[in-house]
């Protein structure tokens, strides 16, 4: 990162469950670490299905249960120009990564990573849209965000 602010984009299929959870968990982590001014964090979808919709109620309730608000967040689709705007682009799963590469035309700068690839258990973040298990998604997202922040701090030194 060549500038003072680290710009992070969290991406999933619809931008109503996993990526907004990751956006607000990451915002909370950097806030609690006293580094909020050093980060700009957003989330987006690879699909157009949920554009303009608020965070899915069970995902919103999971955030609220942990003291986090996502008030005002609505789904948006990732764009080609996001590749230039963001330093790190995090996909929640392998399918997201394929779709992100299609949207951006590839990843020549190595900015795109799967969320859990920063953890000791690389893989896909559990998708609660299909499983209904928001606890598993919360565990994956919080572990992934924590590992990502540690990776960023280590690589900025």
Image (tube, grey):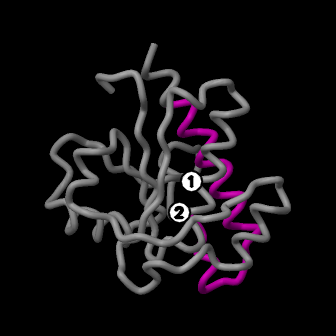
Q: How would you rate the neighbour count of disc 1 (Cα within 10 Å): few for under 14, some for 14-19, many for 20 or more? A: many
Residue beneath the point at 63% across and 56% down: 141
The dot on residue 19 is 2
Measured as percent of width and height from the top left, residue 107 is found at 20, 51
Q: Is residue 23 left or right of residue 89?
A: right
Q: Is residue 129 above or below residue 64?
A: below
Q: Which residue is mark 1?
A: 23
Magenta residues span: 125-151
Q: What SS does tag 1 mark?
A: helix
Q: What SS does tag 2 mark?
A: helix
82 within the magenta span: no
Q: Is residue 131 left or right of residue 118?
A: right
142 within the magenta span: yes
Q: Is residue 147 left or right of residue 99?
A: right
Residue beneath the point at 39% across and 67% down: 94
Q: Is residue 25 above or below residue 95?
A: above
């Amino acid at each position: 990162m060549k500038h003072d602010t680290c710009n992070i984009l969290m991406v999933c299929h619809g931008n109503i469950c996993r990526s907004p959870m990751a956006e607000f968990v990451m915002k909370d982590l950097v806030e609690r670490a006293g580094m909020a001014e050093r980060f700009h964090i957003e989330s987006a979808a690879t699909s157009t299905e949920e554009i303009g919709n608020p965070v899915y109620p069970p995902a919103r309730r999971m955030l609220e249960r942990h003291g986090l608000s996502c008030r005002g967040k609505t789904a948006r689709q990732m764009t080609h120009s996001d590749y230039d705007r963001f330093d790190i682009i995090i996909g929640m799963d392998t399918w997201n990564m394929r779709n992100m590469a299609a949207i951006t035309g590839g990843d020549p700068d190595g900015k795109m990573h799967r969320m859990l690839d920063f953890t000791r258990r690389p893989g896909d973040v559990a998708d609660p849209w299909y499983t209904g298990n928001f606890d598993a998604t919360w565990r994956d997202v919080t572990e992934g965000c924590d590992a990502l922040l540690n990776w960023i701090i280590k690589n900025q030194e």
